[in-house]
């Protein structure tokens, strides 16, 4: 039998992010960033729409970013995210497998750029602001989520997720700026449904 079948439920979830910023630098060359560890935490609802199928909107705080190979330079970005996933939960053993995908939208709420231990606060902007000396990133991000996991009969769940940013978060500095920065990553999390 499906755990919590046929009714809307609410849940909490928290886990670890392994994020990167992929794309192109100002000259159009590939970025050579490496994964940065952060965390995510939030709440979600699960609304049944058919046998084993659910719409799962949520609200998450999520840390993203990237670091250089030698870990001297790091970009820490924090977002409030609104994912809306379509989830399928077929019965597997005494619980349910959890498979899903969907879009997310996010707003930048904080962060810093760290170089040799010195941190500079970032500014989230709509467009590049030449009068602002701080590192700048676009405030809005959006992309796609993919998830797979298992929900136990105890209502605890374990989940693997991947995220593909589809929006360039780099504000264009000039017409010659070929930079394209996109958040990408994966994570693991634990959850509980009420």
Image (cartoon, helix red, strand yellow):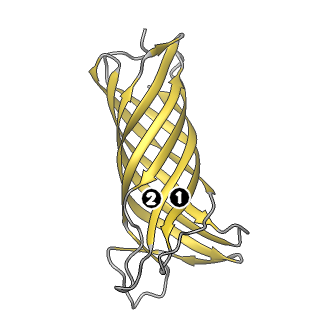
Assess disc 1: are there few (<14), some (14-19) or many (≥20) residues with their C-alpha within 10 Å of its C-alpha: many
Q: Is residue 92 found left or right of 167 in the rendered image?
A: right
- Among the two numbered marks 2 and 1 on one chain, the one whose residue lies closer to the N terminus: 1
Q: Residue furthest right?
A: 70
The residue that appears at 60% across and 67% down in the rendered structure is 32
What residue is shown with label 1? 64
Q: Is residue 163 found left or right of 47 in the rendered image?
A: right
126 versus 152 height, above or below: below
Q: Which mark is residue 178?
A: none
The residue that appears at 70% across and 75% down in the rendered structure is 117
Assess disc 2: are there few (<14), some (14-19) or many (≥20) residues with their C-alpha within 10 Å of its C-alpha: many
The answer to whether mark 2 and mark 1 are in CB contact below 8 A is yes
The residue that appears at 50% across and 21% down in the rendered structure is 155
Give x and y (percent) for residue 74.
62, 69
SS state under label 2:
strand
SS state under label 1:
strand
All told, the count of numbered labels is 2
Real-space Cα separation, disc 2 to disc 1, in angstroms: 8 Å
87 versus 130 height, above or below: above
Q: Is residue 57 found left or right of 182 in the rendered image?
A: left
Q: Nearer the viewer, residue 92 or 79?
A: 92
Q: Nearer the viewer, residue 167 or 105?
A: 167
State which quadrant residue 76 falls in: bottom right
What residue is shown with label 2? 79
Q: Quadrant of the C terminus?
A: top left
State which quadrant residue 87 falls in: top left
Q: Quadrant of the N terminus?
A: top left
Q: Residue furthest bottom?
A: 131
């Amino acid at each position: 039998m499906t755990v919590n079948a046929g009714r809307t439920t609410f849940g909490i979830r928290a886990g670890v992010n392994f994020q990167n910023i992929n794309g192109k630098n100002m000259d159009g060359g590939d970025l050579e960033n490496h994964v940065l560890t952060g965390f995510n935490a939030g709440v979600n609802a699960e609304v049944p729409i058919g046998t084993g199928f659910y719409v799962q909107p949520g609200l998450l705080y999520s840390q993203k970013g990237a670091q250089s190979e030698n870990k001297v330079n790091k970009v820490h970005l924090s977002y409030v995210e609104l994912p809306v996933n379509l989830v399928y939960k077929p019965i597997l053993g005494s619980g349910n497998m959890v498979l899903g995908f969907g879009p997310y939208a996010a707003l930048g709420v904080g962060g810093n750029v760290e170089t040799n231990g010195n941190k500079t606060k970032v500014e989230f902007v709509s467009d590049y602001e030449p009068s602002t000396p701080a590192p700048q990133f676009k405030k809005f991000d959006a992309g796609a989520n993919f998830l797979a996991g298992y929900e136990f009969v105890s209502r605890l769940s374990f989940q693997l997720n991947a995220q593909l940013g589809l929006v360039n978060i780099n504000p264009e500095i000039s017409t010659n700026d070929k930079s394209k920065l996109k958040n990408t990553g994966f994570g693991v999390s634990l959850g509980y449904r009420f």
